[in-house]
Amino acid sequence: MSLIVQKFGGTSVGTIERIGQVADKVARFRAEGHDVVVVVSAMSGETNRLLGLAHEILDEPVPRELDALLATGEQVTTALLAMALHKRGLSARSYAGHQVRILTDDAHTKARIREIDDARLHADLAAGRVVVVAGFQGVDEQGNITTLGRGGSDTTAVALAAALKADECQIYTDVDGVYTTDPRVVDGARRLDRITFEEMLEMASMGSKVLQIRAVEFAGKYQVPLRVLHSFQDGPGTLITLEEEHQMETPTIAGIAFNRDEAKLTILGVPDMPGVAHRILGPIGDANIEVDVIVQNVADDNTTDFTFTVGRGDLARAEAILKEIADELGAREVRSDSRIAKVSVVGVGMRSHAGVASQMFAALAGVGINIQMITTSEIKISVIIEEKFLELAVRALHSSFGLDGEPREEGAA
Amino acid sequence: MSLIVQKFGGTSVGTIERIGQVADKVARFRAEGHDVVVVVSAMSGETNRLLGLAHEILDEPVPRELDALLATGEQVTTALLAMALHKRGLSARSYAGHQVRILTDDAHTKARIREIDDARLHADLAAGRVVVVAGFQGVDEQGNITTLGRGGSDTTAVALAAALKADECQIYTDVDGVYTTDPRVVDGARRLDRITFEEMLEMASMGSKVLQIRAVEFAGKYQVPLRVLHSFQDGPGTLITLEEEHQMETPTIAGIAFNRDEAKLTILGVPDMPGVAHRILGPIGDANIEVDVIVQNVADDNTTDFTFTVGRGDLARAEAILKEIADELGAREVRSDSRIAKVSVVGVGMRSHAGVASQMFAALAGVGINIQMITTSEIKISVIIEEKFLELAVRALHSSFGLDGEPREEGAA
């Protein structure tokens, strides 16, 4: 018998019928002898309905009141799911965030969890009850209702699993697991039975569709085994675990990630002097523009070329800022290109396996793709290429690293 | 400067536009220098929507979960109204019942308020904030969310007014005050400037449309001046006060109340012996049937005739029970009549004015109405008559007691 925290998102609880299906699933876990804590989001559409009401009043609703408003969405789901569980003969209790209580800081609309009081939940579990907790919300020291930001229900689930020392935190979604790459791009993309927290974070460009990055970080920090599963299909899903648990014979590469939403900016002929990177990127950061890949090359004439990527939506703003900087620095030219894509190979295995980079570059060269930028981390190598070659690159790499075919590890719990 | 508690029901906050109108009204009171606490219901239709969801799952939803579900309705309104107040430049804060906190017993769906912590509200008022509190809800000792039953928002408002020692509790409704009788029956019906708590309770058959009886009792007990006003029309409304405040020159009668929803049951020829009333009414009460008027006459032959009225919806059940009792007691006959009505004259003045009863009977005789039953209390005389004479009786009494014309007292605050 183990303690499992299960999180169901808005689509999974979007109708009374689906809430019933969730209750059926919970009932099966109870029948197998597991203790179950369920975290739910607002029914799909409800958060937007409430936001719509608020925006009828104010373009920028008061954060404290917006939180009080939105928090009702999850509370409704918890009560309905508890009823559906009662209908199936299970004892169950719903809890809003303040009832648990899930203590957060007072940063309304984007609060961070500070502490979870697990006393009531443990008492309920000991009494044989299923506990249903509202995701996405908490309460600050002063008793004000707070929310964790969109998608915060994943974080609630992981935080509860950590606080309760749960054996597993299951995130139910509309996909049956984490894939080696996007199945819409590569036919042979395979569900992974396991992936490490670090890999999951690096796979963010795909993973963000499946899991909130913040929840993955949280799970990694507190070593909560996290499993991604399909809400309405049976299957083992993908277990996200600590590296140590499956180091033996781990293949080198977990998956191929990619991102189309980037644009490239280059400032050419910048006088090469200390602090130039800061002079260039400082104003970009001040404008709240996130920078992803950064590459700097020293040229022969004591000038340097500096290239970085930003989200496409930020390109125009970033370019305007960069042109001002170029004037100040006496740089030769600013160029921008939004028709690029980033492709990454991700895997903890590359730490101990030489040659991943050269294999990657060879695979891309083999299909005639020119690499514009390269950046590396311990468990990821990313390249920027022309956007039109994206699918070709992903397929070539997926095949080259042996990802086509069976899942790389079988028999996960 | 005074402290005013204002309560707005579901219709008054049924749309964003109406919430804006309520905010305008609150802003006017603030501009006049008053401290304002606002109690709101769920937006009209919302409670039924939530109930509908619950009933899709269970015919009899779990009370604890039903309370958690329904309480969200008022919370939504509080947040939206607080935003609407912010929009008008007012500082405002919303509070759910548990945040205040409004402590209740644990009788889910019909909880009673035990205690209100006024510390946070006083602090907000002192800081110049408008406080917006969710009506209808509270929290029990264990932190479970409770509700006070439908219409409980009136009770919340009165309880808050009592706890905060407010100068007045204003209940905004869809009528502009309490009338001497139903204006749909008597053209000359007049709004009362004042009425006592006791009179208001006795006028229940009309008053229940305006105010929750429980809230009136509560206001009387804690001596909270209560005012009934129209949500969207200006006017002084009707102030419900302690008797002592307007005893001088009070006219005898405050109003004419009536009720069509009663039916009469008579058991004839019951052997007259001690305990017979209990033998008859005990089983009726056990069946949760409420009895209103009770009259017993002793006949010559050591038997008694026993008549009482019940709600029309309970007539069939009550008659079946009464027939069994009649057999057991050896009574002669059971008769029922659903075509009756009750008409009452109400007024604290009748305590010190003889002749109210005879004037009432004379007025009814004057228009040829036969009285079937009579029952009296300290401040009310009620008669049961044939239903078809109801309007005629009400008009005759309204005129006879001088209620046609101007309000009986002018210049209320």
Image: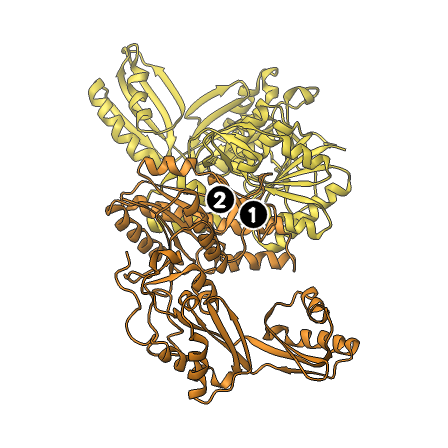
Chain colours: A orange, B yellow
Q: Chain of mark 1?
A: A
The answer to whether the residue labelled 1 contacts the one labelled 2, judged by CB atoms less than 8 Å apart, is yes
Q: Is residue A130 above or below residue A11?
A: above
Q: Is residue B324 found left or right of B38 in the rendered image?
A: left
In this rendered view, identify the residue nearer to me: A395 or B409: A395
- Circle 2 sits in a helix, a strand or a loop, which is it? helix
Image quadrant containing the N terminus of chain A: top left
Residue farthest along the bottom direction in this orientation: A368
Residue hosting label 2: A97
**Do discs 1 and 2 share a chain?**
yes
In this rendered view, identify the residue nearer to me: A73 or B158: A73
Name the residue type under label 2: Gly
Q: Is residue B314 above or below residue A413?
A: above
Q: Tell me the distance, in whole angstroms, between the alpha carbons under discs 1 and 2.
A: 9 Å
Q: Position of residue B373 (x, y in %)?
A: 42, 24
The residue depicted at 37 percent of the width and 34 percent of the height is A123
Q: Position of residue A75 (x, y in %)?
A: 46, 47
Q: Residue B154's quadrant in the figure? A: top right
Label for residue A202?
none
Q: Residue B226's quadrant in the figure? A: top right
The residue depicted at 25 percent of the width and 61 percent of the height is A411
Name the residue type under label 1: Thr
In this rendered view, identify the residue nearer to me: B166 or A170: A170
- Circle 1 sits in a helix, a strand or a loop, which is it? strand
Q: Chain of mark 2?
A: A
Q: Answer few, some or many: residues within 10 Å of disc 2's Cα (few below 14, many 20 plus, some between 14 and 19).
A: many
Residue hosting label 1: A146
Q: Position of residue A307 (x, y in %)?
A: 63, 77
Q: Is residue B120 above or below residue B293?
A: below
Q: Is residue A131 found left or right of B393 in the rendered image?
A: left
